[in-house]
Amino acid sequence: SYVLTQPPSVSVAPGQTARITCGGNNIGSKGVHWYQQKPGQAPVLVVHDDSDRPSGIPERVSGSNSGNTATLTISRAEAGDEADYYCQVWDTSGNHYVFGTGTKVTVL
Amino acid sequence: EVQLVESGGGLVQPGRSLRLSCAASGFTFDDYAMHWVRQAPGKGLEWVSGISWNSGSIAYADSVKGRFTISRDNAKKSLYLQMNSLRAEDTALYYCAKDSSTSIAARPMDYWGKGTLVTVSS
C-alpha cells in the first residue's frame, strides 16, 4: 500500500520559516492536501491540490509538490501555528485515502 | 455554517457492534461525498471509509473492510457507520468529514466534526 512519510517534529523560531515534508513514491503525480490539527481540536484543511489555500488561510501558508516530496511551508511563523500537520493523498491503486504520519510543529 | 455532529460512541466489549451517526447541517448534504476518519489516542489520522453523494461508490480501509459498513440517508441529512466485530485496535476518536465533491476520489475533506469516542475493551 502507498506510504506517506513525514518527519515527527519540526521546530521553528517565531518569524522564521518552517518546512514540513511529505515523502511518497512519485507523489508529484498526485494531488496533495494538508491538514492542521491543534490539541483537542478537529483537523482543518489548510492546503489542497498541492498549493491552493481555502478561504481564511493566510498567504504565508503555502504548498508545493514535485518528484517524491510534497512540502508545506509556513512563513513568518507564529505561536498560533503550533500544531500537528498531516498530508493526504488518494491512492488510486488501493482505492483509498492515505494520511501521512504527521508532523508536530513547535514554535520556540 | 457547516456543522457535523457525531454521536453513538461509547465503551463496547471486543466482538460486539456499535453504530455511529453524523448529523449534517449548513450545506446541501446530498451534493457531497462523506467520510469517516479515526484517530487512536495519541496517534495520527486514519481514513476509515467514504461514500459518494448517492451511495453509488463506497470504499473502505483494509483494516475495517468486511467489518464496517458506511451508509447515508440524504433525506435525514445523516451519515452512518455500522461497526461489527470490534477489536481493541478500533479504539479511537471517530470523525465525520465532508468531502469537497460528489465522489470519493482524490478531493480534500473541507469540514470535520468534533468526533465521537469509541473504546473497545472488556
Image: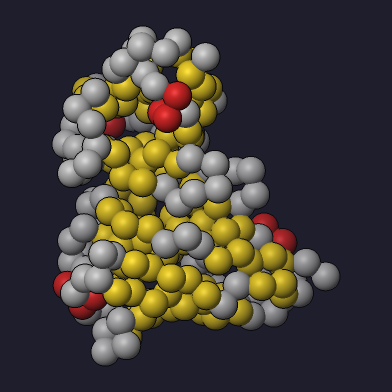
One can see residue A71 in this view: no
Q: Residue B8 falls in which quadrant of the image?
A: bottom right
Task: Indicate whether B6 appears above or below B74.
Answer: above
Residue at left offset 72%, top offset 61%: B88
Along the viewing direction, whichever of B38 and B23 lies nearer the viewer:
B23
Is B52 positioned to the left or the right of A104 in the image?
Answer: left
One can see residue A67 in this view: yes
Residue at left offset 51%, top offset 22%: A106
Residue at left offset 64%, top offset 43%: B42
Residue that lies at the very extreme toward the right in this rendered image: B122
Q: Tell me residue B79's x, y (percent).
A: 38, 77
Along the viewing direction, whichever of A45 and A28 lies nearer the viewer:
A45
Q: Tell me residue A6's x, y (percent).
A: 45, 27
Q: Residue B98 falls in which quadrant of the image?
A: bottom left
Count of numbered circles on the image: 0
Q: Quadrant of the C terminus of chain B?
A: bottom right
Task: Indicate whether B65 appears above or below A16.
Answer: below
Q: Residue B109 falls in which quadrant of the image?
A: bottom left
Residue at left offset 33%, top offset 74%: B24
Task: Indicate whether A52 appears above or below B89.
Answer: above
Residue that lies at the very extreme toward the bottom in this rendered image: B75
Q: Tell me residue B1's x, y (percent).
A: 26, 64
Query: By what rule are the colours in the image chosen?
Result: secondary structure
